[in-house]
Amino acid sequence: MREPRSTTITRATLTALRSSGMTMGQFATDVVTHYHTTVALHERTFEFSTGGDPFKAARANSQILSRLMNGQVRMPVDIEESWVLSLPQPWRGELLSELAHRYGLLAAPEPVTDGVGQQRAAGDLMRETGEALIAVAGLLEDGVIDHRDQPRAHAALRELDDVIGSAVSLKATIERSTRGPSDPTPIRRAG
């Protein structure tokens, strides 16, 4: 059995908040801002505090998110996107990868066409490759990968998935960016 999706999100959120220095108030404000920006008023199923003193609103919204995290209130599906996308990097990317993995998919960022984004995509691939090599080196400390490496294998596999996702993203960036202005978008068959 695996943990519920809300537990995965909560665990990743607590790690991000502890490790990044982001406060719960900042996080709550970011979640609310994203939710209100991306979900139409008539589609919203969740009420947040928005009026008056912004510090009181942040405190109230922090309390709402805390109740969701500790299970007092079930996390509604339509808040997940705002929640996950409000996490700082690299914790956001790690959580997206973990959530995609639950479906047997790899998380690969959308291709980018601007110069800074392209450079970042290349840098991400190099960083992810380095992190994967460190994880694999730990498995190879004794010269072989075998059953004794099982406790560390999951982390190494995750790092390798991140490399694959970064490589797919950079490949798509190159394909999209080098296609001539009159070149049609290629149609690919599913499967």
Image (cartoon, rainbow, N blue to C red):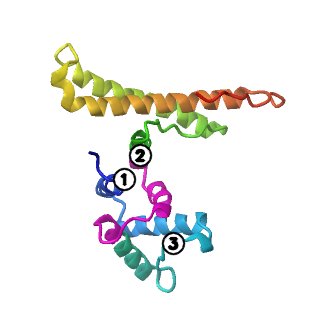
Q: Amino acid at mark 1?
A: Arg
Answer above or below: position of 129 versus 27: above
**Number of numbered callouts drawn:** 3
Query: In the figure, is residue 3 to the left or right of 78?
Result: left
Residue 45 has which mark?
A: 3
Q: Residue at x 42, y 55 (%)?
A: 87
Q: Position of residue 150 (x, y in %)?
A: 20, 28
Give the CA distance from mark 1 to mark 3. 19 Å
Instruction: Specify start and end residues of the magenta stretch as a single range.
Output: 66-94
The mark that comes first in sequence, 2 or 3, is 3
Question: Which labelled disc corresponds to residue 76?
Answer: none
Q: Amino acid at mark 3?
A: Thr
Disc 1 residue crowd, few under 14, some 14–19, many 20+, Cα 10 Å: some
Q: CA distance from mark 1 to mark 2?
A: 8 Å
Q: What secondary structure is found at the residue carrying circle 2?
A: helix
Q: What percent of the width, then of the height, locates residue 132?
A: 35, 28
The local secondary structure at tag 1 comes to helix
Please state which of residues 14 and 26 is positioned toward the viewer in this rendering.
14
Residue linked to disc 2:
99
Q: Is residue 146 shown in magenta?
A: no
Residue shown at 35% from the left, 65% from the top: 23
Q: On screen, 177 above or below 33?
A: above
User: CA separation, marks 2 and 3?
Assistant: 22 Å
Which is more toward the observer, 55 or 84?
84
* Image: 181 above or below 18: above
